[in-house]
Amino acid sequence: MLFEQVIVAVLRNPNKTPLFTVQERIEQIKLSTQHLPNVEVDSFAGLTVEYAKLRDAQVLLRGLRVLSDFEKELQMAHTNKTLSNDIETVFLATSNEYSFLSSSVVKEIARFGGSVNHLVPQHVALDIYRWYAQNHPASTQTMKNAASRINPPIVDLPPETLREQEA
């Protein structure tokens, strides 16, 4: 175990347009990490180092997928050091099987009706299918097909969508 306690902090970032609200993302992460007793999920707005100080954290844990992530994260780590000399940044490289993965890739696949079942936890895939069924109904049939491939199959799209498909 690298850390006694890990806080997954969801940032309320006005510069991004996520599919899900902060509360929805918190619930998705809680479900995904419920088997890890030392993980807490929280949210914040503002600077990460200020949140870390508020929570008495000594380390910011950052994931790296590709070289460009390292450049951006290293710059951020140096900037954070100017704001708080007491907080260290630790980088962890992702496993090769997920090195290509980003939220943008997942959203683009789902937007065009592709299956994301193999890319995210099942409950998150289902949330994504629901979101696109409600906001982009043109790809609903493909979403239904992708959702039905979840093991066990779960097809829980909005009732109006299912009625349209039955007609």
Image: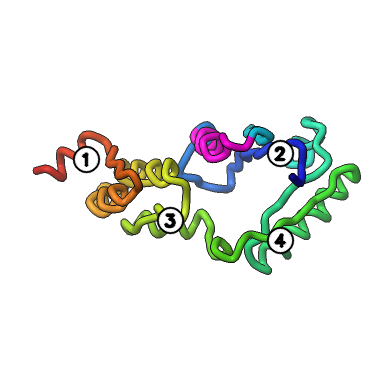
Instruction: Say the numbered circle drawn on residue 6.
Output: 2
Q: Residue at x 31, y 56 (%)?
A: 113
Q: Residues within 10 Å of mark 2 (few under 14, many from 20)?
A: some
Distance from Cα at disc 2 to Cα at disc 3: 25 Å
Which structural element holds mark 4? helix
In the rendered image, residue 110, in percent from the top left (x then y), is placed at 37, 54
Badge 2 vs badge 3, beta-carbon distance below 8 Å: no
Label 4 or label 2, whichever comes before in sequence order: 2
Badge 4 vs badge 2, beta-carbon distance below 8 Å: no
Q: Residue at x 53, y 57 (%)?
A: 102
Vertical relation: 115 (above or below) 56: below
Instruction: Say the numbered circle drawn on residue 118.
Output: 3
Q: Quadrant of the C terminus?
A: top left
Distance from Cα at disc 4 to Cα at disc 2: 22 Å
The amino acid at mark 4 is Lys
Q: Is residue 107 left or right of residue 23?
A: left
Q: Residue at x 68, y 69 (%)?
A: 67
Q: Is residue 115 left or right of residue 37?
A: left
In the rendered image, residue 157, in percent from the top left (x then y), is placed at 28, 39
- Disc 1: which residue: 161
The amino acid at mark 3 is His
In the rendered image, residue 107, in percent from the top left (x then y), is placed at 43, 54
Label 3 or label 4, whichever comes before in sequence order: 4
- Disc 4: which residue: 72
Magenta stretch holds residue 148: no
Q: Quadrant of residue 63?
A: bottom right
Q: Residues within 10 Å of mark 4 (few under 14, many from 20)?
A: few
For this rendering, which residue is in front, 30 or 166?
30
Q: Nearer the viewer, mark 3 or mark 4?
A: 3
